[in-house]
């Protein structure tokens, strides 16, 4: 009885989560430019449109470039910081941990507005690279959290053994720490990448008038009328996120990354 | 290698780049924003350095009191809906096989990472007259004619619960995974039904977690800026929407900055509450 009840509950939640995507998927295969569900006719041309229409293709390219670069920069900021905090006893340095978590904890509009005033004051407002830096700061929290978790999982005696045998800091980092921390770097990068791909407000406030990322393009398209390409892009995004997170789950321990104990403990 | 305090200046090396980036691109912009909130606005979207409180005084109008009241009310409603839906869900999820858990976690992360633009578009499609859910009800014979369900408060609330639900589950997940299963087993052995055990054992054991989660989801919902615009009427706009509106369309940076500073203070106050709730949880 309770088993059936919980199955029903999971079904309803699943339906709630999936329903908008089902409708959007339906809309995306409409044969003609109509917003209709169930779809009238069947056509995959709206998926082709993302790559064939120069406006959408440019937006896709801009978003991908932004996500690749900003996630890399976020990891480049988080890795030495997490390494330092793990390696040294320096309580005051924890302030940087706090600073790294803050942009993501505060309502996004605040980080966005802060960066907007900053870029406007320094005169760089609207330059594409400012979006990369902005996103890297906004999403640095994600690699920072995964990496801090990864470092606590490292057995310190391994590092001590390497030190006893004469390896210096640099060699230890390259040969012992890096291989152990690599899965956490990858998942931190993946989280930052996917979220950067989807981010709207920070990108809009920093480069919204000079560059169109996909979310900005979708929002502009939404205001000036409707095209099924919006639906096909949405499905492409959901699919991308699902594939990336599945890969993270496949090669890493997703429940553990999200705060559960490791699979050996349970 | 034991953890040791940095001895030479070179030991601080790894800290240099991250510290510089965070200070230059987070602390400085943040300080700039606070400074601008006291500046004087000039015609044409510019502002000059000054020390004015007028940007803050503008809050005291009835209009902004209403917007703030509505933002807080909406965020509270979203937080309560999400936590009520997510607690039984997460509890049951943590009791499932690991493989099943992973599938759900991937799905939740995928929804969580979705852009607000996309969620707004998806729900506006779902609530629309031509492609919406009412068409399905018409097909099933439950309704005579398809109709639009937006813009409305219900649409805003649904969209925001959709956005915040995966977040709520992921916040609750670690606490619920660590919950000692023997607690409920003991209750069951003593003859409680699973539902009774859930409400009399699991929920009280998680009281502090639930408080902390409510506050975190509340802050998360405060940040929503596009869904109220896409799914609601102007009276459903939140403080985040007004900040963007003032900054971009009214070109009144000082006022936008003042509102943002105010939002930070509200948020920080709530984070402090979360930390206190968390401390109590550890002590208990």
Image (cartoon, grey):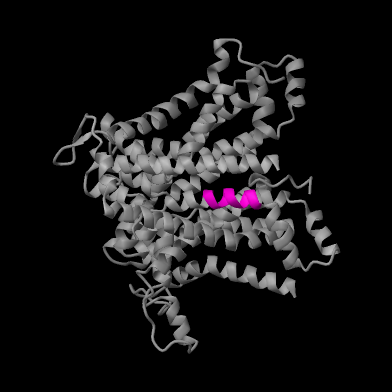
- Residue B111 seen from this side: no
Residue at the spot 18% in from the left edge and 41% down from the top edge: B45
Question: x%, y% of residue A146?
Answer: 60, 39
Q: Residue furthest top?
A: B8
Position in image of residue A115 (x %, y %)? 35, 37
* Residue range highlighted in magenta: B207-216
Give left or right: position of B27 versus A86: left
Q: Does residue B211 appear in this view?
A: yes
Q: Which one is nearer the viewer's eye here, A28 or B156?
A: B156
* Image side of residue A38 versus residue B99, left or right: left
Front residue (pair B270, A149): B270
Asked if residue B138 lies left or right of residue A117, the reply is right
Whether residue B105 sits left or right of residue B156 in the image: it is right
Q: Residue at x 66, y 32 (%)?
A: A151
Query: Which quadrant, please, contains the N terminus of chain A?
Result: bottom right
Quadrant of res A144? top right
Count of numbered labels shown in the rendering: 0
Residue A28 vertical placement versus B27 (above, below): below
Q: Position of residue B280 (x, y in %)?
A: 64, 41
Residue A54 lies in quadrant: bottom left
Image position of A206 with respect to A239: above or below? above
Tell which residue pokes out farthest to the right in this image.
Answer: B189
Of the pair B99 and B90, the residue shown nearer to us: B90
Q: Residue furthest left?
A: B43
Q: Is residue A127 above or below residue B215?
A: above
Q: Is residue A143 above or below residue B24?
A: below
Main SS type for the magenta part? Answer: helix
Residue B120: x %, y % from top left: 40, 62
Q: Which residue is more in the foreground, B239 or B126?
A: B239
The reply to whether the magenta stretch includes residue B125 is: no
């Amino acid at each position: 009885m309770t088993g059936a009840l919980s199955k029903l509950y999971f079904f309803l939640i699943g339906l709630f989560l999936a329903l908008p995507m089902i409708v959007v998927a339906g809309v995306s295969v409409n044969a003609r430019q109509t917003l209709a569900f169930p779809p009238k006719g069947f056509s995959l041309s709206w998926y082709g449109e993302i790559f064939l229409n120069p406006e959408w293709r440019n937006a896709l390219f801009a978003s991908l470039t932004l996500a690749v670069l900003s996630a890399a920069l976020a990891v480049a900021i988080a890795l030495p910081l997490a390494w330092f905090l793990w390696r040294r006893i320096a309580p005051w340095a924890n302030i940087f941990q706090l600073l790294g978590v803050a942009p993501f904890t505060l309502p996004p509009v605040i980080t966005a507005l802060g960066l907007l005033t900053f870029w406007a004051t320094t005169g760089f407002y609207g330059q594409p690279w400012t979006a990369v830096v902005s996103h890297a700061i906004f999403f640095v929290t994600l690699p920072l959290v995964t990496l801090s978790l990864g470092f606590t999982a490292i057995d310190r005696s391994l590092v001590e053994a390497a030190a006893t045998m004469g390896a210096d800091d640099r060699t230890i980092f390259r040969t012992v720490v890096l291989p152990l921390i690599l899965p956490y770097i990858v998942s931190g990068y993946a989280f930052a990448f996917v979220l950067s791909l989807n981010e709207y407000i920070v990108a809009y406030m920093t480069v919204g008038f000079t560059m169109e990322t996909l979310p900005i393009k979708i929002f502009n398209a939404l205001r000036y009328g409707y095209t099924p390409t919006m639906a096909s892009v949405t499905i492409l995004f959901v699919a991308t996120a699902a594939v990336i997170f599945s890969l993270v789950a496949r090669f890493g321990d997703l429940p553990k990354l999200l705060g559960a104990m490791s699979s050996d403990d349970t | 290698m034991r953890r040791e305090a940095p001895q030479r200046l070179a030991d601080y090396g790894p800290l240099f780049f991250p510290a510089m980036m965070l200070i230059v691109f987070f602390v400085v912009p943040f300080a700039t924003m606070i400074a601008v909130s006291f500046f004087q606005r000039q015609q044409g979207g510019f502002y000059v350095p000054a020390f004015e409180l007028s940007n803050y005084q503008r809050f005291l109008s009835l209009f902004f009191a209403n917007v703030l009241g509505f933002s807080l009310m909406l965020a509270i409603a979203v937080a309560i809906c999400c936590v009520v839906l997510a607690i039984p869900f997460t509890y049951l999820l943590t009791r499932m096989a690991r493989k099943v858990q992973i599938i759900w976690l991937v799905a939740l992360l995928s929804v969580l990472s979705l852009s607000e633009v996309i969620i707004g578009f998806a729900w506006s499609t779902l609530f629309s007259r031509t492609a919406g859910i009412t068409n399905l009800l018409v097909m099933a014979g439950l309704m005579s004619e398809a109709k639009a369900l937006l813009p409305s408060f219900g649409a805003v609330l649904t969209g925001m619960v959709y956005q915040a639900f995966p977040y709520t589950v992921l916040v609750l997940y670690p606490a619920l995974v660590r919950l000692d299963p023997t607690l409920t087993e003991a209750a069951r052995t003593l003859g409680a039904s699973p539902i009774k055990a859930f409400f009399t054992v699991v929920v009280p054991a998680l009281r502090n977690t639930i408080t902390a989660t409510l506050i975190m989801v509340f802050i998360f919902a405060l940040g929503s800026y596009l869904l109220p615009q896409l799914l609601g009427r102007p009276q459903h706009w939140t403080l985040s929407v007004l900040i963007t509106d003032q900054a971009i369309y009214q070109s009144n940076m000082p006022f936008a900055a003042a509102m943002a500073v105010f939002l930070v203070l509200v948020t920080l106050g709530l984070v402090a509450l979360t930390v206190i709730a968390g401390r109590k949880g550890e002590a208990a």
